[in-house]
Image (tube, rainbow, N blue to C red):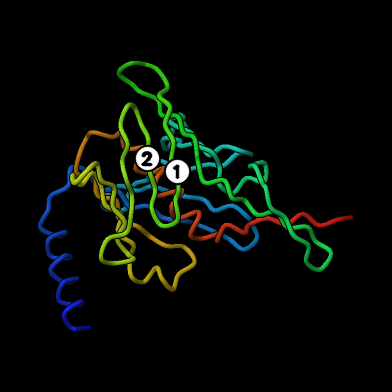
Amino acid sequence: MRHLKLFILSLYIVSIQCRASLRNYVFIRNSSKLVRESNYFIYNSNRNSIVCRLQSLNSLTNLLLYPSNVRVGFIDNPYSPLRKFNKCFFNEYRLYFVSVVSSYDMNIYNLQSNEWIRGSIYQNRYEYTINYGDNSYYMRNRVSPLITEIYQGNSLISRFSMNSLSLLNENPKYNIEIYSDILPDPVHIFALYIFDSLKSKKRFPYYFPFG
């Protein structure tokens, strides 16, 4: 049975490699034990040029083009202590707040219409629903925990593949493959950002000491 699963996984990986994507990016988290929040950088496919970066300020995370720092999108910051909390507990004279909010509002700037378009990302256990425009999309792991995909119905929109070495690394690296123009690129970046953020912080990120 184990060999059969490995064989099916190998066939799936081959099918991934054979499919041509429209655009590719490399998404890298740069975290530090000295800083609560992580920095994220998005490179081109050759990883020789930064395309944009994510910058967290209080309750929002901004998507900034590099090096101009022009803001093209923003989303609720999952690391922010200003988010709503409805559970708390005490441990060693510290008050811990546990965030159970799983909906994240985002805004994407549309260059063609010159306006901001709202959307949201909603988490339900291991699946995510992305609402943008008048449509809904679904993000989930398939076959391998290293592969996360966005679908509209049965149509594959994009795929995020984590480097296997990232499992042992504090700063994981993902390959972003976009197969459709139905969603703007910032939506894919925000979806992966929320997915990786919630994985990294285990949803227990904050404590507020007394005194």
x and y, in percent, of residue 63 in the image: 45, 37
Residue ranking furthest to the right:
211
x and y, in percent, of residue 141 in the image: 32, 59
Q: Residue at x 20, y 83 (%)?
A: 1
x and y, in percent, of residue 48 in the image: 32, 51
Mark number displayed over residue 81:
none
Residue at the disc numbered 2: 130
Relative depth, front residue between 156 and 122: 122
Side of 10 where 163 appears, left or right: right
Neighbourhood count class around disc 2 (C-alpha, 10 Å): few under 14, some 14–19, many 20 upward? many
Neighbourhood count class around disc 1 (C-alpha, 10 Å): few under 14, some 14–19, many 20 upward? some
Labels 2 and 1 touching (C-beta < 8 A): yes
Q: Residue at x 37, y 35 (%)?
A: 131
Q: Residue at x 31, y 53 (%)?
A: 47
Side of 5 where 126 appears, left or right: right
> Circle 1 sits in a helix, a strand or a loop, which is it?
strand
Relative height, residue 186 to residue 207 (above, below) = above
* Type of amino acid at the residue the image marks with label 2: Ile
Residue at the disc numbered 1: 122
Residue ranking furthest to the left:
18
Mark 2 or mark 1: which comes first in sequence? 1
Q: Residue at x 50, y 36 (%)?
A: 62
